[in-house]
Image (cartoon, helix red, strand yellow):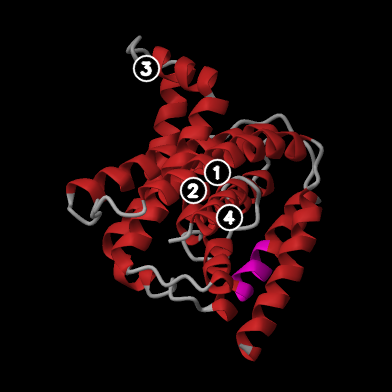
Amino acid sequence: MEIIDAIILGIIQGLTEFLPVSSSGHLELGKAILGDNSVPEESLLFTVILHFATALSTLVVFRKDVWEILSGLFQLKWNEETQFSLKIIISMIPAVFVGLFFEEQLESFFGGNVRFVGSMLLITAVLLYFADKAKDTDKKVNFKNAFLVGISQAIAMLPGISRSGATISTSVLLGVDKTKAARFSFLMVVPLILGKIAKDVMGGDLVFTGENNVAMGAGFIAAFIAGLAACTWMIKLVKKSKLSYFAIYCFMVGLVAIAYGYLA
């Protein structure tokens, strides 16, 4: 793997993990354009490294929130922090179910099918458009909403469906405050990413050969820095209700991807 390619893919992952444009979809498109020829084990390892970088950037941006949640949990009381943590756990159920029982079927969509990615980006565009038109509220995520948002997160495991776009849009369409929706969306994915990494490492699915360490390290740093910027930027954009810009972007990229898939 070339260092410059690793940096490009790292930036793509860092930006698109938080911006509602589908990180998995853009990574698939990026690999197709760059002509990624990585062996499966190396490709999986690099993907995990990039996801760990964006999870770390989330923890940095929301460090105060994470600390408050952990502090509240140690009080062993039915307080706001305990309730929020329970909502996070509830939101994880659909994605964990899909990951455990449909992993092979899910992986079949990650084979460079550019036309499929383009079609899913069009769906993301529609979600973002309607969410942008939703009225402002001051409501928090409740337990029922947490599960419904979790279903959106599970569906967003498909390449081209934006995880942040789907979860934030679902929350907003359910009447949740946009800023609270973004906060919940970004925090709910951290346990899933860390759990996935732990599962892959303990299950022996990741092979650390010592090769391409420099390139992978460069990709990690690029994804972390880009993730910090994108996470902070996205929170501000959601407050100002600018999701329609991303809807247009996803629509255009989706059309280009579909056209590229037919012509390539």
Relative depth, front residue between 95 and 34:
34
Q: Quadrant of the C terminus?
A: bottom right
Frontmost of labels 3 and 2 is 2
Disc 2 marks a residue whose amino acid type is: Gly
Disc 3 marks a residue whose amino acid type is: Leu
The answer to whether residue 102 shows anywhere in this view is no
Of mark 3 and mark 2, the one earlier in the sequence is: 3
Q: Residue at x 76, y 61 (%)?
A: 249
Secondary element at image label 2 = helix
Q: Which residues are magenta?
A: 118-124
Q: Which mark is residue 8?
A: 4
User: Contact, CB < 8 Å: mark 1 with mark 2?
Assistant: yes
Of mark 1 and mark 3, the one earlier in the sequence is: 3
Structural distance between the alpha carbons of marks 4 and 1: 8 Å
| Mark 2 Cα shell of 10 Å, populated few (<14), some (14-19), many (≥20) | many
Q: Which residue is mark 2?
A: 219
Can you say whether 148 is above or below 259 in the image?
Answer: above
